[in-house]
Image (cartoon, helix red, strand yellow):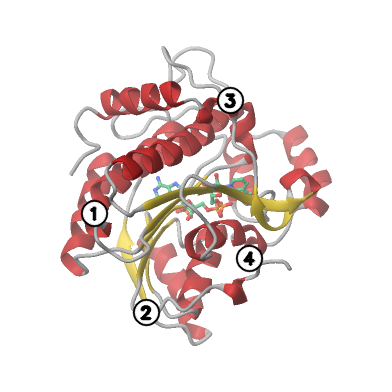
Amino acid sequence: MVWTADAIPSQEGRVALVTGANSGLGLATARALSARGATVVMACRSRRKAEAARSQLLEVGLTGLDLLELDLADLNSVRCAASELCDRYGHLDLLFNNAGVMAPPRTLTKQGHELQLGVNHLGHMALTLQLLPLMQGRHDARVVTVTSGAQYFGRIRWTDPSWNEGYDRYGAYSQSKLANVMFALELEAQQQEQESGIRSLAAHPGLARTDLQPTAIATGGNQFEALVYRLMDPLFQSADMGALPQLHAATAETAQGGEHYGPDQWGGMRGHPTRCWIAQAALDREQRQRLWQLSEELAGGLLMP
Ligand SMILES: NC(=O)c1ccc[n+]([C@@H]2O[C@H](COP(=O)([O-])OP(=O)(O)OC[C@H]3O[C@@H](n4cnc5c(N)ncnc54)[C@H](OP(=O)(O)O)[C@@H]3O)[C@@H](O)[C@H]2O)c1
């Protein structure tokens, strides 16, 4: 039997934070969790877009939607957001590291890291490490980090992670998505060693019709890329379908820490959630620990609370 959003158990009394909740998979995730009774903190960088997204959900009768300002391209903003969440709730049950940026022209974050590495990986790593104390001791607390099929093509550029040389828009995206799954697995290993009870899982949506590809084309693409996406369009599923693997990872009773979920059809491009394979580099603990250390060095003290 396929898993759908109807299978999400009641989330009454639980607090979930979703990054990038104003659009695409984040918005679909917020909608599904709110419909099951969760308090959903929509963590977004644009107050205007966040308010518009919340209004959209309120109009269909959903409740328990809170807004939090978060710019993952600035580790100081991440720190402020984590501290604000602590003041407002004092605890957290579910964290969705969902927000993402794909294939922009080479841009740097506030701290000088390549944007995709900074937003997709470093910002989420900092957010997670700063929110873990709020998840400690909560029943069935889970962190879900959203990766992509691009992880399978990813390679960590150990000596030049910010692409000072030879920037490749999709190479940098793949690196960041490999980093996402490496982080998710290493976090799981560490939480198990500490017997914290907090679980960490990864999920990818396959191909989902969101703002991700249009933004990539508008900011850094060309006519050929636009044509390729137009030709691929029939393969894309809805944002609601694309959000199912992350919702499954976060709420299904059967989902275990360290697992990776994605769609079950067309080689993982579309369909309902199923367990799927993990990029080889992420299975290697030495490489994961090396990335953890590199991330700490890059963030220069801004990862931890
Ligand atoms: N759609 C797909 O086919 C696909 C495939 C594989 C993986 N994914 C992954 O799915 C996740 C969600 O993407 P999506 O498809 O839903 O795309 P989307 O519709 O473009 O949503 C991306 C979200 O991330 C937010 N974001 C970007 N930069 C940010 C920053 N500096 N700080 C905070 N938030 C920021 C965006 O905010 P703004 O609206 O303000 O820009 C938006 O809310 C991403 O991690 C992506 O890599 C998507």
Mark 1 CB lies closer than 8 A to ligand 1: no
Q: Amino acid at mark 3?
A: Gly
In the rendered structure, which disc, 4 or 1, sits on the residue that comes first in sequence? Answer: 1
Q: CA distance from mark 4 to mark 3?
A: 27 Å
Which residue occupies 28% across, 64% down?
138
In the rendered structure, which disc, 2 or 4, sits on the residue that comes first in sequence? Answer: 2
Give the vertical position of 55 relative to 258 (above or below).
Answer: below
Q: Amino acid at mark 4?
A: Asp
Front residue of 149/162: it is 149
Front residue of 205/118: it is 205
Look at the numbered disc 4 and give the secondary structure of its residue.
helix
Tag 3 residue: 171
Front residue of 113/15: it is 15
Compared across the picture, whether 302 is left or right of 112 comes to left
Specify the quadrant that holds the N terminus.
bottom right
Disc 3: CA contacts within 10 A as few (<14), some (14-19) or many (>=20): some
Tag 2 residue: 64
In the rendered structure, which disc, 4 or 3, sits on the residue that comes first in sequence? Answer: 3
Q: CA distance from mark 4 to mark 1?
A: 27 Å
| Image x and y of residue 233, in percent | 79, 51
How many numbered discs sit on the rendered protein?
Answer: 4
Tag 4 residue: 240
Residue 82 is tagged as: 1
Q: CA distance from mark 2 to mark 4?
A: 20 Å
Look at the numbered disc 2 and give the secondary structure of its residue.
loop
Disc 4: CA contacts within 10 A as few (<14), some (14-19) or many (>=20): many
Which residue occupies 45% across, 56% down?
20
Disc 2: CA contacts within 10 A as few (<14), some (14-19) or many (>=20): some
